[in-house]
């Protein structure tokens, strides 16, 4: 949603870095003109391989992917870039970048072997992306997670924007009531970043958003969804009931 908002509002070449990919690595790195090409991937991988030769330890897969993405975005002249964190936040490679706004979606029990066995511990890792004096946007959270976010934001003099209602406009391009909350987060983040598109532009961006593997309908009455934890499964079931009863 955030990337689509940028594309519609100000930056036709806005970059997007996500993980994981579903079919091809190229899906992780794209701008409004499309995914990174195989040729550009090979070229920048060559640059990074030469640059990191002999390093001990070697960069991780995710660190190299991010570095490659940033090099490509700079080459493409992307004025705005949306970076999705990997597992957590505090020790995530994307945390090397200081953003104009941070977004923390609903925190659930996930990747406990890396992030901790309690919601409070996981929230502490996620809150690691909060930068001094950089606004942070979030939506409804469990009380213990929200307490951590509020404490971290206050300690870093970061304005915490708590979105308290879902998107009320035209239906989003992604199915499910939870996607209205995600759309509202994106709009709040855009405004916190200094963007103030008109209502029609926002509505077009929200309606145009597509994402494979998010209640994606395939031919032959098949729905593809990548839900992989309890919160995501609950959202999948709720969406199924909304769509099919």
Image (spheres, rainbow, N blue to C red):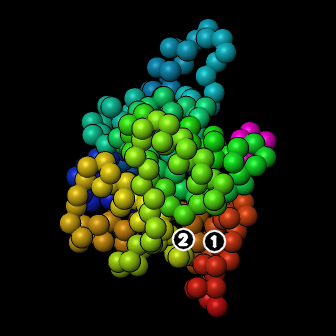
The residue at the point 24 percent across, 70 percent down is 199
Residue marked by disc 2: 178
- Where is residue 48? Give x, y as percent: 50, 21
Residue situated in front as seen by the camera: 1 or 36: 1
The residue at the point 64 percent across, 91 percent down is 245
Residue marked by disc 1: 235
The residue at the point 74 percent across, 39 percent down is 114
Q: Main secondary structure of the magenta part?
A: helix
Q: Quadrant of residue 7?
A: bottom left
The residue at the point 54 percent across, 41 percent down is 152
Is residue 198 positioned above or below 52 on the image?
Answer: below
Residue situated in front as seen by the camera: 197 or 24: 197
Tell me if residue 150 can be seen: yes
Q: CA distance from mark 2 to mark 1?
A: 7 Å
Q: Is residue 110 left or right of residue 31?
A: right
- Where is residue 242? Give x, y as percent: 58, 85
Q: Quadrant of residue 239?
A: bottom right
Residue situated in front as seen by the camera: 48 or 85: 85
Is residue 33 positioned above or below 89 on the image?
Answer: below
Whether residues under marks 2 and 1 lie with C-beta atoms below 8 angstroms apart, the answer is yes
Q: Is residue 204 left or right of residue 218?
A: left
Which image quarter holds the N terminus?
A: bottom left
Give the crowd class for mark 2: few <14, some 14-19, many >=20 residues within 10 Å: some
Q: Earlier in the sequence, mark 2 or mark 1?
A: 2
Q: Magenta stretch?
A: 111-115
User: Is residue 178 in the magenta section?
Assistant: no
Task: Give the SS element for disc 1.
Answer: helix
């Amino acid at each position: 949603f955030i990337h689509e908002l940028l594309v519609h509002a100000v930056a036709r070449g806005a970059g997007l870095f996500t993980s994981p990919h579903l079919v091809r690595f190229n899906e992780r790195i794209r701008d409004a003109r499309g995914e990174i090409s195989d040729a550009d991937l090979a070229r920048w991988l060559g640059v990074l391989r030469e640059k990191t030769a002999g390093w001990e330890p070697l960069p991780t897969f995710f660190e190299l992917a991010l570095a490659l993405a940033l090099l490509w975005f700079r080459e493409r002249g992307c004025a705005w870039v949306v970076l999705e964190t990997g597992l957590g936040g505090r020790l995530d490679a994307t945390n090397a970048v200081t953003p104009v706004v941070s977004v923390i979606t609903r925190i659930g029990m996930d990747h406990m072997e890396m992030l901790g066995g309690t919601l409070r511990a996981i929230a502490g890792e996620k809150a690691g992306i909060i930068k001094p004096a950089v606004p942070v946007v979030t939506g409804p959270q469990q009380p213990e997670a929200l307490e951590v976010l509020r404490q971290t934001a206050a300690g870093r003099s970061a304005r915490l924007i708590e979105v308290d209602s879902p998107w009320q406009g035209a239906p989003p391009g992604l199915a499910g009531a939870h996607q209205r909350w995600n759309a509202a987060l994106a709009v709040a983040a855009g405004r916190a970043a200094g963007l103030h598109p008109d209502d029609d532009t926002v509505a077009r961006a929200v309606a145009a958003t597509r994402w494979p593997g998010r209640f994606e309908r395939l031919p032959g009455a098949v729905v593809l969804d990548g839900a992989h934890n309890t919160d995501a499964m609950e959202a999948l079931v709720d969406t199924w009931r909304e769509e099919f009863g």
